[in-house]
Image (cartoon, rainbow, N blue to C red):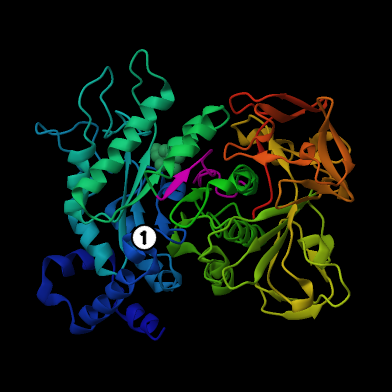
Amino acid sequence: MKLDGQIAAVIRPPEALFAGISNRRSISTVMLVVVFVMASCAMSSPAQENGRLALTPPMGWNDWAHYQCGFTADDILANAQALVKSGLSSHGYNTVTIDDCWMQKARDSAGNLQVDPKRFPRGMKAVADAVHGLGLRFGIYEDAGYLTCGGFAGSGVPKGGGKDHFLQDARLFASWGVDYLKLDGCNVYVPPGETQEAAYRQAYAAQAAALKEVGRPIVFSESAPAYFQGSPEWYDVLGWVGGYGQLWREGTDVKVFHPKKPDASRFDSILWNYAYNLPLARWQKPGNWNDADFIIAGDSGTTAAESRTQLALWAMMSAPLILSSDLRKLDSSSIAILSNPSVLAIDQDPLGQSASLIRRTPTVDILFKRLKSGEFATAVSNHGADTARVELHPSDLGFSGSDGCRLEFENLWNGKRQSTASIQAEVEAHDTEIWRVHAGSACGAPKRVGTIILTENEQKHDFGFEGYTRCLSSQGTATACTGSSSETWVVGTAGSLRSGDSCLAVASGKAIMQKCSANPAQHWTWTQAGQLRQGPNQCLTGAHSGLTLQPCGHNLVDQVWSLPSR
Ligand code: GLA
């Protein structure tokens, strides 16, 4: 940690950094030592253990949500330096990625991508070298289609058919020393007679094969699912992306910074990305991460409370933490939030679990997550306009309700510890409290407890966070979540779904609650696609009019359920 001071001492403006790279003799011995030490830290990161990539959620910085196409190499390097100088890099934010617009619209006569010379007068290798020289990793953006989302040359099959450029581009990236590739999914050519999903799958498989062939360990971020959000194919795509890459965007972009409206609130957008990411927990494991998009906490349009909320929610989901703000302008309280080591440890926990939704009221979410150490994390997030008062008992989190069960809570924002039978919390509007929880031996192992939810087929966040999710209730409905105890379920090891003293069962083709027993009619099989099945082809169906059993369809909106994590 003493390193921080040394690094700060050698931070120089971007031009000087370039000059240092082109004239090696001008780099001081101190700089060389620091760079060497930092580079070796980066290489020994657990993110690349045993040759497997991204065993914990990737962290870093990307220009897009703050700059869009309005950047130059100097902006990239100034942010890379700020990442180091602020201490954020020493907390794990270690990859600097250049998003769209770095290339020209056309390739050269040999089919090579051409860097935009106005933005990158010294080319891309010089930028990559400078980023590496700061002890950071270097990431770049391309697209699986014939054009990027911004209309620049893509790596994919040309419009109308022809040869793709995945391997040629991967070789170029490897020659620059790229460590991380974000492959977007605009403008993918779909040949006649082929499905859109098949065309995307071919493109992402081809990129994965190309990365393998060039042999450099490059973390592969796939945007494919985001192009299917709101359709049944969304779940099919989520089913294959993990075989090709380490993380994937599943949906809408977080709201970008707009210089003409710098103060426009971006909180709804944070909530919306959280809303669609949380129910996808079952796709996630170490080396395979759902990406809820950039961390805009601390940038214009977010308050301190909202910044805590974004970081805490992303940490509870084990989501990638990719900052996308002007790091030079972050104030010290934002940097303190973003570098809170206790919250970051929840995000980077090696178990890689995403949180279970314990309870959802119209304004408050309660989340719970298992940690590798045998401890737990819990969070109370208040997106309402008033302070929320919450009391959490061990049984709410799935622990034994016995008198002897005491939980030790460490508040991760202020470090306060409490050892109590229940915790009472006041959570300010738009804020999130997050605790590390240690359960006493009388508490036993927690049951798999929480809500069972359906989500709507909606793609746009203007649909609203509140309307997106419906909660299965033991009243026989799947309607807007209220937070009532009828929406709390315990998932049994033998596939039972218990709420209170009763279990969900099928009788005469109907879904009913009955006394819990070993009756096979109470045995539900939860599939990776999210279906709750009984028998060969009957699915629990949460129509707005009530619960029924229907033949299982292809990822039908009323049949895709999210259960508490194991
Ligand atoms: C899409 C992506 C964004 C960004 C832009 C670039 O919208 O989702 O993250 O990469 O393209 O054009």
Q: Position of residue 39 (x, y in %)?
A: 28, 72
- Is 248 inside the magenta-drawn segment? yes
**Secondary structure of residue under mark 1:** strand
In the displayed structure image, the side of residue 419 where residue 101 appears, left or right: left
**Residue at 87%, 39% in the rendered image:** 513
How crowded is the residue under tag 1: few (<14 C-alpha within 10 Å), some, or many (20+)?
A: many
Q: Position of residue 457 (x, y in %)?
A: 64, 29
Residue under numbered circle 1: 95
**Is residue 424 shown above or below 127?**
below
Q: Position of residue 460 (x, y in %)?
A: 60, 32
**Residue at 83%, 66% in the rendered image:** 393
In the displayed structure image, the side of residue 147 where residue 485 appears, left or right: right
Specify the quadrant of the image occupied by residue 127.
bottom left
Prevailing secondary structure of the magenta residues: loop
Quarter of the image that includes the C terminus: bottom right
**Residue at 84%, 46% in the rendered image:** 517
In the displayed structure image, the side of residue 107 where residue 429 appears, left or right: right
**Is residue 495 shown above or below 224?**
below
Q: Which residues are magenta?
A: 246-264
Specify the quadrant of the image occupied by residue 55.
bottom left
Name the kind of residue labelled 1 in the image. Answer: Thr
Specify the quadrant of the image occupied by residue 149.
top left
Q: Position of residue 480 (x, y in %)?
A: 80, 37
Ligand 1: which quarter? top left
